[in-house]
Image (tube, helix red, strand yellow):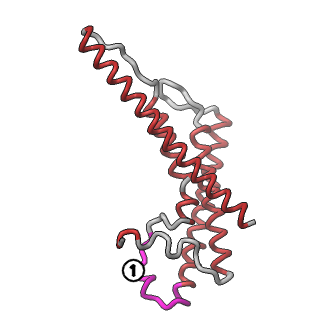
Amino acid sequence: MRQALDILYRTAGRLAAAFIVAIVAVVFLQVCLNLADKIAAAITGTGLGLTIPSYADFTGFFLAASTFLALAYSLREGGHIRVTLLLGRLPARARHGVEIIVVAIAMAMSAYASWYIILLVYESFEYGDRSSGMVSVPLWLPQLPVALGLIILTIALLDELVALLRGRAASWEGKGENLLSE
């Protein structure tokens, strides 16, 4: 089970990275088209009007997908910002208890958000909602990676909660906390 969960988290992280690469590719291509347009305008006096239709919409969709798909992987790798000012002053046993409470609350919030984004995806699919850009995209398509990211985050938080209840340390312990002090 542990191996399957780790594969799930890494796969979601890789998908998030792929969406970041897609953002870079679309923006780079649009910049190249803008440059070609400016060069054509300088030479001939008129631009070519080159553009990627709805490129801003697509990069926004890709950003949402990468953000939400990266949540579980970032959690496990200690990449989330945690305020440990109070937590660091507690004895180990009390700190562990507070971690359990905080992870349980986070899991409940993530499950709640997952439920409602699933309903939103279903509603968008059912009613045929579409984006309003030059390229009309069915809205359930960009909403689906957001829902998947939240579902995977909920699974990761449940995984953490079970580990904490069994007395283990959180997966993020010692991973991302000292990045600024190096």
Q: Which residues are magenta?
A: 82-95
Residue located at (28% from left, 19% from top): 38
Task: Residue at 46%, 35% (x, y): give it.
Answer: 25
Write down the quadrant of residue 29 in the picture. top left
Percent coordinates x, y for residue 131 in the rendering: 52, 32
Determine if the magenta segment contains residue 79.
Answer: no
Residue at 65% in and 34% down: 127
| Above or below, comparing residue 14 to residue 92 in the picture | above
Q: Residues within 10 Å of mark 1 (few under 14, many from 20)?
A: few
Q: Considering the image in quadrants, where does the C terminus appear?
A: bottom left
Q: Is residue 82 above or below residue 90?
A: above
Where residue 41 appears, x then y in whole percent? Answer: 27, 14
State whether residue 58 is above or below residue 43.
below
The residue nearer to you, when weighing 157 against 133, is 157
160 left or right of 26 in image: right
- The location of residue 148, given as percent across then percent down, is 63, 50
Number of marks in picture:
1
Q: Quadrant of residue 180?
A: bottom left
Please, which residue is most extreme toward the top here? 44
Mark 1 lies on a secondary structure that is loop
Residue under the image location 55 percent in, 48 percent down = 16
**Residue found at the very far right of the displayed protein:** 1
Above or below residue 166? Residue 36 is above
Q: Nearer the viewer, residue 107 or 42?
A: 42
Q: State yes or no: residue 87 in magenta.
A: yes
Q: Position of residue 168 (x, y in %)?
A: 63, 81
Residue to which mark 1 is pinned: 85
Quarter of the image where the N terminus is located: bottom right
Which amino acid does the dot numbered 1 rest on?
Answer: Leu
